[in-house]
């Protein structure tokens, strides 16, 4: 398994968000998480990458990267620089000011995988929302993650751009990565995901839909 | 049937208390500062005499005034730019977005508060005793005070920077220092540059005042003119100051507009 979540619990101010959530994701699998607002989908992903501390439960994960709803790129920097920042975890501080050429080449390959090699020198502020989200996915690839957790990656995008991004996530899963995406569009989930997990009251509602 | 609008809410007790405090403070301030419009009206002759003795301006000192104004400008410039490293270091240490720890942040904030609370004129008086009269003391004074003010403004700007890119880089395994360099600073750079230009504008005006306490520049000439009762020379110097301040203000505003801050 690339990602195993067992009995995850999390409360905020006495309100239970996750109440024993379980999830297994294999390499090469694209899992879509569906559920109403507040059902704990995003919290589960944030716990999995360490942005939130769970109250209880176990998480075992291969190296994971996160793609955010708000995209979270540094808009003033170029697409290439933003992708390079995905590798900061394995760079010493002294090499974090001007990225080495080997890393820039690797970042170009990541941009190529998301179809944006020709926009590498463009500032992110000048890219469309869909392109920005693809740069954020390239940043996750540059992190050399084996698991990509995407928290509502297409909520702010128009339908065409949203389909393009979800198709890209599916492609990455086909390349061997484990992908979990929180989606609010059941039609996209049914069209692209290998498996759909619906959350209800902080738990995975059964039965799961497998395609 | 017409819908009745909700009743207006009566002012809260807190709002009434705040209003009372503000009014009381103004009454006390009026008394403590001896404000008296009648004294101002009855003393108009003194002002008229002063203005009469200062006009027309003595333009023979214009060359010396311009030279001194350039020194004032240089003092403001160096006082601003030489404080960049110290202000940046203290801002990075004190901002919630970049600090390595709460103890460090508190220590850095304390240093900034101290530097900010000591007026630049007081720093100038201290440095004059060390390096003598002249612009060097003024530059040192501006560097100290400006570090405090600019460091605080920059730290606030970093505090308000978008949290998203910071979270994204933390998830990627970046250290706090790497997050500061790669997410916080690139995001807030235009804002920092805008604040720097604003401080340059303020520091050029401050360096004028520092001249009055012996730190050189055109402020020093204004002080000398007053002591020698050469108010016509003083007016010439003040006109030069006016041109200098307006020019720096316009330049700073222009560049800030171009930066979009």
Image (cartoon, helix red, strand yellow):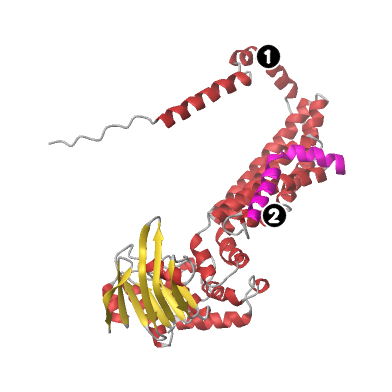
Question: Which residue is the site of mark 1?
Answer: B45
**Residue B223 lies in quadrant:** top right
**Residue in the picture at 65% in, 71% down:** A93
- Among all residues in the image, which is located at the extreme left? B1
Tell me residue B151's x, y (percent): 65, 50
Q: Are marks 2 and 1 in contact (CB under 8 Å)?
A: no
Q: Looking at the image, tell me whether mark 2 or mark 1 is earlier in sequence order.
A: 1
Q: For the N terminus of chain B, give its image quadrant.
A: top left
Camera-near label (2 vs 1) is 2
Q: Are marks 2 and 1 on the same chain?
A: yes
> Magenta stretch containing residue A22, yes or no?
no
Q: For the image shown, how many numbered marks are present on the structure?
A: 2
Q: Main secondary structure of the magenta part?
A: helix
Q: Residue at x 60, y 63 (%)?
A: B180
Mark 2, residue position: B84
> Is there any visible trace of residue A123 in the rendered image?
no
The image shows residue B22 at horizontal and vertical percentages of 51, 27
**What span is in magenta?**
B103-131
Instruction: Decide which of B45, B206 is in the foreground and name it.
Output: B206
């Amino acid at each position: 398994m690339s990602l195993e979540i067992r009995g995850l619990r999390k409360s905020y101010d006495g309100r239970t968000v996750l109440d024993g959530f379980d999830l297994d994701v294999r390499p090469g699998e694209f899992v879509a998480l569906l559920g109403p607002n507040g059902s704990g989908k995003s919290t589960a992903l944030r716990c999995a990458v360490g942005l939130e501390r769970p109250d209880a439960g176990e998480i075992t994960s291969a190296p994971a990267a996160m793609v955010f709803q708000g995209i979270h790129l540094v808009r003033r920097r170029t697409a290439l620089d933003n992708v390079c920042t995905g590798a900061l975890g394995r760079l010493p501080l002294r090499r974090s000011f001007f990225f080495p050429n080997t890393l820039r080449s690797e970042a170009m390959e990541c941009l190529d995988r998301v179809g944006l090699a020709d926009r590498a020198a463009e500032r992110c502020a000048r890219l469309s929302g869909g392109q920005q989200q693809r740069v954020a996915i390239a940043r996750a690839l540059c992190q050399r993650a084996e698991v990509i957790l995407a928290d509502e990656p297409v909520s702010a995008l128009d339908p065409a751009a949203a389909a393009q991004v979800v198709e890209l996530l599916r492609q990455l899963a086909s390349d061997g990565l484990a992908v979990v995406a929180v989606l609010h569009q059941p039609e996209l989930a049914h069209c692209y995901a290998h498996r759909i997990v619906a959350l209800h009251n902080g738990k995975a509602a059964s039965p799961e839909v497998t395609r | 049937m017409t819908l009745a609008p909700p009743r207006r809410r009566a002012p809260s007790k807190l709002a009434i208390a705040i209003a009372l405090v503000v009014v009381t403070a103004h009454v006390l301030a009026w008394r403590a500062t001896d404000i008296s419009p009648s004294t101002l009206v009855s003393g108009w002759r003194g002002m008229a005499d002063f203005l009469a003795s200062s006009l027309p301006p003595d333009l023979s000192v214009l060359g010396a005034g311009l030279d001194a104004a350039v020194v004032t400008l240089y003092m403001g410039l160096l006082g601003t730019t030489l404080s960049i490293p110290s202000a940046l270091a203290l801002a990075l240490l004190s901002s919630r977005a970049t600090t390595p720890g709460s103890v460090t942040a508190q220590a850095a904030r304390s240093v900034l508060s101290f530097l900010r609370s000591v007026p630049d004129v007081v720093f100038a008086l201290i440095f004059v005793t060390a390096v003598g009269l002249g612009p060097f003391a003024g530059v040192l004074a501006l560097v100290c005070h400006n570090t405090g003010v600019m460091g605080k403004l920059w730290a606030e700007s970093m505090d308000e920077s978008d949290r998203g890119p910071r979270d994204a880089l933390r998830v990627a395994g970046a250290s706090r220092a790497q997050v500061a360099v790669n997410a916080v600073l690139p995001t807030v750079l235009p804002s920092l540059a805008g604040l720097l230009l604003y401080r340059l504008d303020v520091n050029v005006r401050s360096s004028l005042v520092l001249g009055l306490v012996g730190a050189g520049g055109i402020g020093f000439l204004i002080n000398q003119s007053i002591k020698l009762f050469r108010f016509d020379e003083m007016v010439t110097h003040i006109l030069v100051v006016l041109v200098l301040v307006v020019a720096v203000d316009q330049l700073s505003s222009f560049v800030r507009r171009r930066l979009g801050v």
